[in-house]
Amino acid sequence: MPERHNALPELEPSSLLAVIEFTETQVKNFRRSLLSWYPRHRRAFPWREEPSLYRTVVSEFMLQQTQVSTVLPYFERWMKRFPDFETLANARESDVLKHWEGLGYYNRARNLRRLAEKLSGRKSMPETPEAWRELPGVGPYTAAAVTSIAFGARAACVDGNVVRILSRIHSDDTEFRDGGAAARAYTATAAALLDPARPGDHNQAMMELGATVCFRTKPLCTTCPLLRFCRAGQGGDPEKHPVLAAKKVTRVEVPRLWCRRDNSLLLHRASGTARRLADLYELPDAQLLGLEAGDTESLGPILLRRKRSITRYRITETIHRYSPPRGRKVPLSAGSGLEWIPLDRLNGITLSGPHRKWVDELIAAEGEADSDG
Ligand code: SF4
């Protein structure tokens, strides 16, 4: 087949999800454009400036589900307290969680510590994506990122950034059930484009391009190094891609209690085996005391109302100033998870991120009210 130059390939829809039909020359030019753009435009992050296997692993765990601007201060603090796999493996889980407080998805911290336990003291580290997939908390993306960056493994990273770029390059109208399905569909294409000589830089360049140029909305196509390969960029309507099925949104209301006694606050600690937030504290859900949303007389006045989204859930949380009816005690039975925490101990426990903010906010508001009074 003759090579085509300076033209976008004619792609059959069925080929979009397999290997991209660029000519060999186009693939080489694609890699060259990407890799000459990257060193001039990459942002200086601590895990890039002083790279090591440990720093790469920690940054990849922190960056799963979390934006880089949020991660940066956590990363610096983490490195001071847990500078290597050995220190992390020997740390108490409560200490590890405390240093993760506010980053969310706390299983990442537990898995990172378990991974450190498995790797600390080893004479040689696993170097293949397959071996890394055996370690706690390591999925296909993290395995590819760590091994390509640290060991030059020829493994392509595919996440939302990469899917966005590749679906736009193809101008792909295929509707995917969700981001995971799209990532699986684009794995072969990403692997075919990966530069085998510099897989770590190639993967980081794709991530960087997705994060700083190929934005979800208003991508900066005119300055993009891949414009000449990109159908959607040239067509002027890149925001249409990728096409993901609309998510079914579920709205939930959760009344929570602000219940004070002397110098203590009532909190709920999730069980150590809970799927989410294991061992973390939160303001108690009113249901734990047998109270229902809408029963404003029993719940008490609303102090705060906050909205947040977790996956497909749109959650409205109202925090009520609750006083138990005269003669009724808060049920602190074993297994209820309810505990009175003295205010001067609050900084020593791990609250989930939003609850830490709300507790600080309400304590500050009470302090102001006391000084006004
Ligand atoms: S040309 Fe535009 S749409 Fe295409 S990869 Fe670049 S920024 Fe994204």
Image: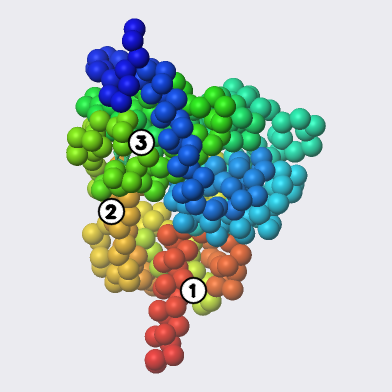
Residue under numbered circle 1: 261
Is 262 drawn above or below residue 30 in the view shown? below
Residue 368 at x, y percent in the picture: 42, 85
Is 235 drawn above or below residue 267 in the view shown? above
CA–CA distance between discs 3 and 1?
62 Å
Foreground: 35 or 211?
35
Q: Amino acid at mark 2?
A: Glu
CA–CA distance between discs 3 and 2?
45 Å
Near mark 3 (Cα within 10 A), the count class, few <14, some 14-19 or many ≥20, is many
The answer to which quarter of the image holds residue 192 is top left
Classify the position of ligand 1 by quadrant: top left, top right, bottom left or bottom right. top left
The answer to which quarter of the image holds residue 347 is bottom right
Residue under numbered circle 2: 253
Residue 62 at x, y percent in the picture: 53, 47
CA–CA distance between discs 1 and 2?
26 Å
Residue 83 at x, y percent in the picture: 70, 51
Secondary element under disc 1, as helix, strand or loop, is strand
Residue drawn 38% across and 23% down?
26
Residue 154 at x, y percent in the picture: 56, 24
The answer to which quarter of the image holds residue 293 is bottom left
Foreground: 293 or 65?
65
Secondary element under disc 3, as helix, strand or loop, is loop
Secondary element under disc 2, as helix, strand or loop, is strand
Residue under numbered circle 3: 226
Q: Would you say residue 99 is visible in this rendering?
A: no
Q: Amino acid at mark 1?
A: Arg
Near mark 2 (Cα within 10 A), the count class, few <14, some 14-19 or many ≥20, is few
Near mark 1 (Cα within 10 A), the count class, few <14, some 14-19 or many ≥20, is few
